[in-house]
Image (tube, grey):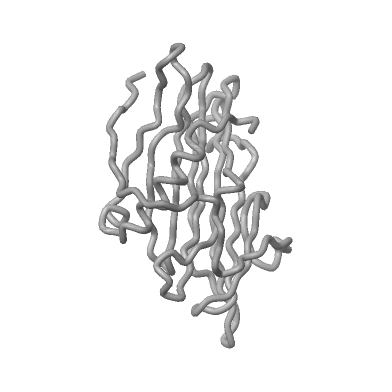
């Protein structure tokens, strides 16, 4: 397996990626039927900003049979952002990411980093940024998982895609690489700096942690 080792340098800023939210987002318990979502809820946050009352929901599925090939399974992660205002409730965005083509006797895993699911207003414009970070893996051995940070400001999506990092020898690692999409490349430096802090915080996290 060829491991990409490209290194993308972010501008460095002095702040901690602890998902401290100036918007005072609170963890809430939701009724899935109220929001018409898929999967099991991992975490839900609610806050107010210039858009209205916002609800961010992260969900994931259990493994399920792949359509057209009963030898294989898939697993999904979902993200949703709903906004409520005087006009009612609407879905601002939805994401779905699938790990597929995994033979049933292999390990198929998906996991959100719960502490990385958060809300910020880094550029202080009154429209909060939402952050989801997760990894997925289909494997028969120890190897880096696919890892993503998905950030939204309003309806605009910013994505970092790469791999978690795992030990290879006593002093070397596999993985840890990442790449910014076009929106993130053009994003304000404060977004890039915060994303870099998040990546560094979670890239070495094990599945059981």
Q: Quadrant of residue 86?
A: bottom right
How far from the left and from the top, in percent, is residue 207?
Answer: 60, 31
Q: Quadrant of residue 48?
A: bottom right
Q: Residue at x 50, y 60 (%)?
A: 130
Q: Residue at x 49, y 50 (%)?
A: 16
Q: Residue at x 67, y 49 (%)?
A: 40
Left or right position of 3 against 69: left
Q: Residue at x 39, y 67 (%)?
A: 123
Q: Quadrant of residue 75?
A: top right
Residue 185 vs 206, above or below: the answer is below
How far from the left and from the top, in percent, is residue 140?
Answer: 53, 18
Q: Residue furthest top?
A: 170
Residue 178 vs 56, above or below: the answer is above
Residue 22 vs 69, above or below: the answer is below
Counting every numbered tag in the picture gives 0
How far from the left and from the top, in percent, is residue 177?
Answer: 35, 33
Quarter of the picture holding the N terminus:
top left
How far from the left and from the top, in percent, is residue 33?
Answer: 71, 64
Which of the pair 107/208 is nearer the observer?
208
Quarter of the picture holding the C terminus:
top right
Residue 98 vs 205, above or below: the answer is below
């Amino acid at each position: 397996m060829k491991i990409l080792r490209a290194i993308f340098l972010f501008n460095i800023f002095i702040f901690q990626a602890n998902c401290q939210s100036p918007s005072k987002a609170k963890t809430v318990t939701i009724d899935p039927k109220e929001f018409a979502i898929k999967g099991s809820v991992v975490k839900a946050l609610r806050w107010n900003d210039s858009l209205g009352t916002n609800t961010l929901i992260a969900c994931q599925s259990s493994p399920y049979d792949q359509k057209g090939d009963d030898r294989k399974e898939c697993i999904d992660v979902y993200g949703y952002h709903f906004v409520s205002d005087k006009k009612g409730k609407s879905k601002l965005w939805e994401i779905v990411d699938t790990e597929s083509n995994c033979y049933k006797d292999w390990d198929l895993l998906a996991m959100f980093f719960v502490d990385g699911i958060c809300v910020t207003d880094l550029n202080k414009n009154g429209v909060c940024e939402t952050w989801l970070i997760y990894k997925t893996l289909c494997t028969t051995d120890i190897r880096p998982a696919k890892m993503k940070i998905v950030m939204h400001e309003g309806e605009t999506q910013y994505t970092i895609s790469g791999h978690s990092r795992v030990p290879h020898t006593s002093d070397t690692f596999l993985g840890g690489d990442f790449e910014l999409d076009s929106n993130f490349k053009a994003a304000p430096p404060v977004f890039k700096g915060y994303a870099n802090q998040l990546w560094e915080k979670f890239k070495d996290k094990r599945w059981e942690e």
